[in-house]
Image (cartoon, rainbow, N blue to C red):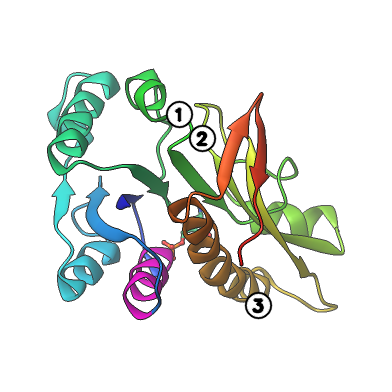
């Protein structure tokens, strides 16, 4: 399975996925990084890992649709079969959603549908939930909406700050994202009527 990761920032999930794909027997190849921020740390990570990068500056294009068309061309050229949004800080339009619905996932640092959008870890702390976590879901063009593939719970501890909680959430993400990608790469994930079914592995 040929994968493109879209990321705008640190890229720890990109790294975790790239390492998992290499170190384990996930039948997948991380073939492309798509990034809208030339200075992002994820760009250096891709370089060290030898993953080709498509870097673009949204300002160089007349519209969101225009740069998305360019992205879709690149994805087609590379034969990308799965898109993974891992800290890609932009909304995605139908230009990408239509051709990739059911083949594009996002990772979010909360138990959706709770706390969508930016600052999910802070939102959870401010609300005072005792349990939060991580969600991997198919992307339907809404803000962190779409059929849920996998979730993992993370407990909020007494005295947690945004930093300490985010650290444990990140650790959970680094396990859950490669796992969800494995399920998809192994052909165990089906999407019907907005519900995801995951067939158990051997
Ligand atoms: C992660 O928390 C992810 O859930 C969210 O953005 C963050 C990206 O972190 N969508 P990183 O860039 O992978 O370190």
Residue 125 visible, this angle? yes
* Residue 78 spot, x, y in % from top left: 15, 43
Residue at x-position 16% and y-position 54%: 53
Q: Which numbered dot is residue 164?
A: 3
Q: Which residues are magenta?
A: 13-23
Secondary structure type for disc 2: loop
Residue at x-position 21% and y-position 34%: 71
Secondary structure type for disc 1: loop
Q: Earlier in the sequence, mark 3 or mark 1?
A: 1
* Residue 201 spot, x, y in % from top left: 61, 62
Look at the image and say whether residue 24 sits in the magenta stretch. no
Q: Which residue is mark 2?
A: 139
Magenta portion: prevailing SS class: helix
> Which of the 4 quarters of the picture holds residue 167?
bottom right
Q: Which residue is mark 1?
A: 101
Badge 3 density bin: few <14, some 14–19, many ≥20, Cα 10 Å:
few
Marks 3 and 2 in Cβ contact (< 8 Å): no
Q: Is mark 3 within 8 Å of ligand 1?
A: no
63 up-or-down from 133: above or below: above
Give 115 or 24, whichever is nearer the viewer.
24
Residue 145 visible, this angle? no
Marks 2 and 1 in Cβ contact (< 8 Å): yes
- Mark 3 vs mark 2, foreground winner is 2
Identify the image quadrant of the C terminus: bottom right
């Amino acid at each position: 399975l040929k994968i493109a990761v879209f990321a705008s920032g640190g890229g720890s999930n990109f790294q975790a996925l790239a390492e998992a794909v290499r170190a384990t027997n996930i039948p997948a190849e991380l073939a492309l990084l798509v990034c809208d921020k030339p200075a992002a740390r994820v760009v250096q990570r891709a370089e060290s890992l030898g993953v080709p990068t498509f870097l673009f500056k949204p300002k160089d294009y007349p519209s969101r649709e225009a740069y998305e068309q360019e992205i879709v061309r690149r994805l087609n050229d590379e034969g990308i079969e799965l898109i993974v949004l891992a800290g890609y800080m932009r909304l995605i339009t139908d230009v990408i959603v239509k051709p990739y619905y059911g083949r594009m996932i996002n990772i979010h640092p909360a138990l959706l549908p709770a706390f969508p959008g930016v600052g999910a870890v802070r939102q959870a702390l401010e609300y005072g939930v005792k349990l939060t976590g991580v969600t991997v879901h198919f992307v339907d063009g809404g803000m962190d909406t779409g059929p849920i593939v996998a979730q993992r719970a993370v407990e909020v501890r007494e005295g947690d700050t945004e930093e300490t909680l985010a650290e444990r959430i990140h650790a959970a993400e680094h396990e859950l994202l490669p796992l969800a990608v494995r399920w998809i790469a192994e052909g165990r994930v089906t999407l019907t009527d907005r519900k995801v079914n995951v067939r158990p592995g051997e």
